[in-house]
Structures are given as C-alpha cells and as structure tokens.
Amino acid sequence: MNQPLRRFDGKTALVTGASRGIGAACVDRLVAEGANVVCADINGDGAEGTAQRSRDAGVEAIGVQCDVGDEASVKALVSGAVERFGQLDVVVNMAGILSATHSHEETLENWERVIRVNLTGVFLVCRESLPHLIESKGAIVNAASTSSLSGHPWFAAYGASKAGVYMLSNSLAMEYAKRGVRVNCVAPGGINTDMVQVDMPDDVDGRILARMMPIGPMGEPDMVADTVAFLASSDARFINGEIVRVDGATLA
C-alpha cells in the first residue's frame, strides 16, 4: 500500500534553478519517481552536485551551467539535453532572483536583471523546449508566485516578472493544448529557502510585510516539489493553464 509513485519512469526532466531550494527539491522528487534529469543552474558546481545526488539514487543525470537569461546558453542547454537523453518530457522552470527596495529608488539595471532572469529566462527555456515537448506530449511547470496574484510592496520588479510568468504560461497553455503540451504554474509563498533571506529597506512597515506571509509556519521546498510533480504527471492530464498556490493560506 505504501509503494512509491513511479510516474516518470522512462521520462526525462529538465529543471532550472536546480542547485538548491525549490529547484533542487523538484529534482529530488522527480528522481524519486524514476525520471532522468538535466539539472541546470547558473551555479554549475551546484547543478553538478544535484546531478550527482540523482545519479547516486540510480537514475541518469547531468549538471549543466546555464544562464537562463542568455539565449545562447539556453539553446545549448536544451539541445544538449535532447542529444544526451534523446527526448524531453518535463520542463520545470524554477530559476529566479529576488531583491527588495523602495520602487522610487529602484535602478533600471536591477529592474532589467530581475525581468531577464525571472521572465525572459522562462520564455527562452519554454521556446527552446516546446518543439521537443510537442513530440513527447510533455508538460511545463513554471514558477509563478503569490506576487503573481497580489501586490508585494518593495518587490515591484519581482512581482512584475512573476505576473508575467503567469500570463506567459496561460498563453502557452492555450496555444499548445491541441498539440498535446500542458503548461501550468505553481505559486509558492512563504517557503523557507535561501532566496527569501533578502535585505529589506530599514523603514518597511511590518504590518504590511506580515500580509505577505503565511498564517502558520513557513513552508518547505519539498512541499512545492510535491505539487510540481503532480502537475507534471499524467495524474494532472486535464489540468492546463492553471496556477496552484502553495502558500499556507497566505492569499486565502
């Protein structure tokens, strides 16, 4: 009765942001269900560390250094994945960056950096992966956020990028549904990762900040990974163009 799920036996998954946090947890969950994995991250050593852990678990895995905001880097990532494994069945876009500032003090350089990684990076990985996912009738799961759905003061660039991911995912879901590809989002909120240890402006209003936090304790990366695995699996075969909050009732 307690046999582990094996929903990804014989399938290949590509996960960005795979060196730590939610991305690494997604790799671990997909590997536990039998997937071969391509672990991508701008931190190449971290990506390889996750890949080695996956190989130790008995699957085939490679770690790839990739800047998701760089077109040539993404092209090489996807073509290399397909060359190595012969197919691509699941794409999980978890690479992302976060910074906090008063919006009237935000620099154009930082704004463009956040948009490039969080939104343009998702677009590039999706664009390069879609021809292969059409062939495999595969699935994409993108990292949106509670900031895709609700205002997050001091995080204007991040919120704009994640709202863009949500709408990009919906557009792709409709465009490619008849070709057998599903595209969904998870919207984490209040997850205990290194990324949330961000420096805040000294004079933030604690009452407003509390509105962005879960009612109970912080969530853990594996809680998001469980939802990602479901959305990527055949159990979710009629779920397309959806955003699933994993936020401990933050936006309930």
Image: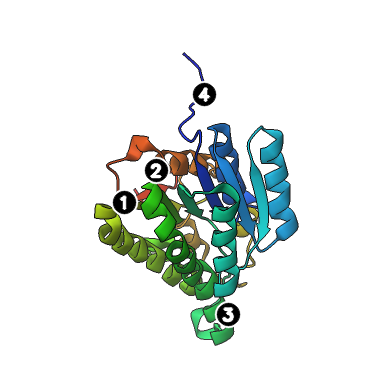
Residue 189 in picture, x, y percent from top left: 47, 52
Give the SS element for disc 2: helix
Q: Position of residue 56 (x, y in %)?
A: 71, 35
Q: Gap in Å between the C-alphas at discs 1 and 4?
A: 26 Å
> The disc labelled 2 sits on which kind of residue?
Leu
Image mark for residue 213: none
Classify mark 1: helix, strand or loop. loop
Q: Which residue is mark 1?
A: 242
Circle 4 is placed at which residue position?
A: 4
Look at mark 2 in the image and give the residue it sits on. 231
**Mark 1–mark 3 distance (CA, rounded to whole Å):** 29 Å
Say which of 218 and 207 sits in front: 218
For marks 1 and 3, the one nearer the N-term is 3
Instruction: List the residue tagged with mark 3.
Output: 110
Is residue 250 something one can see in this rendering? no
Of mark 4 and mark 2, the one earlier in the sequence is: 4
Answer with mark 2 or mark 1, whichever residue precedes in sequence: 2
Give the amino acid at mark 3.
Asn
Circles 1 and 4: CB distance less than 8 Å?
no
Residue 107: x and y, percent?
Answer: 56, 85
**Image quarter of residue 197:** bottom right
User: Looking at numbered disc 1 in the image, what kind of residue is underneath it?
Assistant: Glu
* Disc nearer the start of the sequence (4/3): 4
Does label 1 or label 4 sit earlier along the sequence? 4
Q: Is residue 110 above or below residue 10?
A: below
